[in-house]
Image (tube, helix red, strand yellow):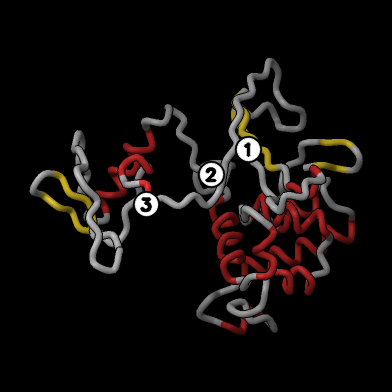
Amino acid sequence: MIKGAKMAVCKVPSNDMEALKSSLMGLFEKKRCMNFYKYIENVEWDKKETWKDINLEVQPMADIYKKYKLETNTIDFLGHAVALQTSDEYLTKPARDTVEKMQLYLESIGRYGDSPFLYPIYGLGALPEAFSRLCAIHGGTYMLNTNIDEIPFDEEGKVKGVRNGENTATAPLVICDPSYTTPDRIKPVERVIRAICLLDHPLPNTGKAPSIQIILPAKQLNKKTGKSKQFLTFSV
């Protein structure tokens, strides 16, 4: 995050108590942010009385921020570092999606360590291993060294599954690399710019963490492209 005229790395407050100690906000804003976090934590989707006087399925996220009188900088880190929204378009959309994302973030803190994110400590090979276990729990099948000959579609153009020789595995959704399908089925929706930064020292104010995620909202960088989130992940 950018603080004042200088850029400084600051920890995003992940709950109401951290909000009171954060250096990202002034005294009164800390109190407002704490109340906002308490509201998000207490929302229950089957009990509309917990929504207070806001219809989360209809009203935009901007209405909630307005209700708690949050400042622009606070809205930046809540929307892009907590809810992980990719642009400011979420402000005008129904609040439910963003509130659910924030609840997931808050519930994930401390579940598997201090970070809300799962990190493959022993390399990327841990990801397919974890997926195979999760797949087995839910009754799925994990097939190794299996070529995909075709991704069949029905008459309406909806995917039906994947085919390997005479065997077809049916599924309502297929997640794959674009190389597995044909160009007419590919539609680019976003572009990602990646860079690898090799550092010879830990970043200030990060507690010498071996791996961190730094989010720079576009507004903080005076960008006017409409995109409001950029990720920089450093391994130091």
Tell me the quarter of the image containing the C terminus: top right
Residue hosting label 3: 184
Report the residue that reaches farthest toward the front. Answer: 184
Report the residue that reaches farthest toward the left. Answer: 166
Give the tally of numbered discs.
3
Which residue is depicted at the point 50% across and 44% down?
Answer: 112
**Residue 83 in the image, given as x and y percentages of width and height:** 62, 56
For marks 2 and 3, give the one nearer the viewer. Answer: 3
Q: Quadrant of residue 36?
A: bottom right
Report the residue that reaches farthest toward the top. Answer: 200
Amino acid identity at mark 2: Phe
Dot 3 falls on a residue whose secondary structure is: helix
Amino acid identity at mark 1: Gln
Give the alpha-carbon distance from disc 2 to disc 1, as whole Å.
10 Å
Q: Which of the labelled discs sits on residue 117, or is there none?
A: 2
Mark 2 or mark 1: whose residue is earlier in sequence:
2
Q: Quadrant of residue 195?
A: top right
Mark 2 or mark 3: whose residue is earlier in sequence:
2
Q: Are marks 2 and 1 in contact (CB under 8 Å)?
A: yes
Q: Is residue 116 left or right of residue 202?
A: left
Q: Which of the labelled discs sits on residue 213, or is there none?
A: 1
Dot 1 falls on a residue whose secondary structure is: strand
Give the alpha-carbon distance from disc 1 to disc 3, as whole Å.
35 Å
Q: Is residue 82 left or right of residue 76?
A: left
